[in-house]
Amino acid sequence: MTLIFACEVVLAGLLLAIATWTIVARTAFAAIVLFMVYGLLLAIVWVALSAVDVALTEAAIGGGVTSMLLMGAATRLRAPKTPVADVGLPLKIAAGLLCALVTTVLGAVVFFLPDVAPTLAPLAKDNLAASGLGNPVAAVLFVFRALDTLLEKVVLLLALVGVWSLASDEAWGGVPGLPVYARPGPILVFLAQILPPIGIIVGIYMFWAGATQPGGAFQGGTILAAVWLLTMMARLQDLPAINARWLRLLLVVGPTAFLAIGLAGFFIADSFLAYPPGIAKPLIIVVEATLTLSIGVTLALLVAGPPERLPQR
Amino acid sequence: MSSAALFGYCGAVLVGLGLYGLITRAEVLRKILSFNVLGSGVFLLFGVFARRGAAAGLGADPVPQALVITGIVVAFSATALAVALLVRLNKETGQIIVTPDDSEESGEQGATR
Amino acid sequence: MTITDFLLLAAAFVLLMVAIGLARILYGPADVDRILSVQLIGSGGVAVLLLLSVGMNLAPIMDVALMLGLLATFLAVTFLRDEANSSSISPSTTEER
Amino acid sequence: MRLALDIITVVLVSAGGFFFMAGTIGLLRFPDTLTRLHALTKVDNLGLGLIVFGLLPQVESRLGALKLIAIWLLVQMSGAIVSQLIAQAVRRSGRQT
């Protein structure tokens, strides 16, 4: 037991050191690399908290695609040669005091938490069988709190609409401005050829495993997104124009299937987003499979950014 | 000290760190980064509550876990939107910071982030 | 000392080594030095997670190791894109095609 | 039988941990990026490889063992390719300065 704790102390120390460094690093570029490491470390922390589902999501989205996004932004920004001056010392001290206060209050909250923590775990466990799933977190996401998950998909799509709406008028409907390798070398091309099949298998595995053990649509979808971005960065594949019919279709197929099955719940079960007993699991699998595709495409397009040029004829 | 408490304090410090970066760093990209650190601190606190709610043979309460998963995805959406705004701002003005300005236009840009 | 204890001890040790290595690489000075850190956390993190997975007898942790290894590769490629493009004097991608 | 398997695990995992330590010392001591990359690849190949082989006797299910090997192969392969890419980037940036 103490050995595990020793592990955790090392982990917590490393995490805080990297986080501090991320904030104080001199250049934005160094800060982003530190943030990458931070995200991957955080995944290990989630494992230590026995939240393996969250660990997978954190590694994939928090550490993975967020860093890819920020790295792309750093490339696209025309940074000035001189370093940017931050706020003055008095404000820094004031901010430091404020943040120390916030940390102290939060720390006190953690310290004075009641001995017996409130929990919904037994409730989730008891109703797990009814959902037909073996993974309690997936059951919460797709059965007990399905509305949250549906709305979250809508948020993803809304964010994409927001990103696209920042395109200039001439570029509307065109190709996103994801920075790509100017001259992909043979080694990179090899990697970009060999990794997609593996990535697709792992992605499908994550989605499939999600029903009974940690994993699921987000994690699988993220891997698909990363694979797609890799082939586009290595220029094995052109970026799609955002008004392509197939692209729009892929974007909405997941949420639409989710919504349709949810609405069908009015007729074949008792309420919105309710599944009829017995076929709950197949329905959830259909929803998850389409969501995996939609999430993959949406995440990749969010990383790719707003359209910047018209497709070449 | 239990491991849940250890990471709870960790989360509290991360929130403070992220907030500090959000206030003091001038570059918008650094602000976005700090905001992500702040968010991960909040998620970690959720994780601690989930861990403390371990019961019925589960290592952690699944409900906060599901909330955090949703939260991570939403945080990513917000980050993507913020980055797109920043890139557009940079294209229009050549700036990578939001300058305090009295004119209405840049005031609006400042308000977006 | 049981085999479980040993594996957890090994995990802590590897984590410590990775931490020290990270500190060195992240110090820089060149940006390309820093990308080694993603490599290191990729392989080191996978090792730690595999040790934990077997040590704590929790098979799903192996999936996290898989995810970590895969994502570290994507991140390295994304990083090197900027490194490659900034040091080669090539026209922008639009004109080249 | 159990004891023999445990001894194999202890020996191989310790050897893997040793290479992690050697890699870290290399990272601390070596003077430039290319040599540090060299140290890191030792961690990738030998450190992780030995740990994976050390863990194999402890995994009960055949599927788990297969997954362990698959993860190792994946990290090994992508690590080797990414190391090449990093080395190229180092050379390029070296030529420029």
Image (cartoon, coloured by chain):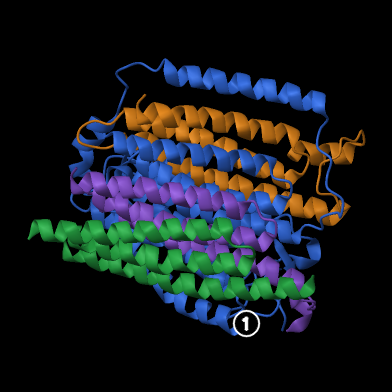
The percent coordinates of residue A158 (x first, y second) are 59, 49
| Chain coloured green | D
Q: Quadrant of the N terminus of chain A?
A: top left
Q: Quadrant of the C terminus of chain A?
A: bottom right
| Chain coloured purple | C
Q: Is residue A60 above or below residue B112?
A: below
In-image side of A91 versus A256 (left or right): right
Query: As shown in the figure, which amino acid type bears the numbered disc 1?
Result: Gly
In-image side of A55 versus B61 (left or right): right
Q: Do we see residue A139 in this rendering?
A: yes
The percent coordinates of residue C67 (x first, y second) are 41, 59
Q: Which residue is mark 1?
A: A185
Query: Which residue: 47% across, 55% down?
Result: A60
**Hue of chain B?**
orange
**Hue of chain A?**
blue
Query: Which residue: 27% across, 49% down?
Result: C7
In-image side of A208 versus B105 (left or right): left
Q: Do we see residue A266 in this rendering?
A: no
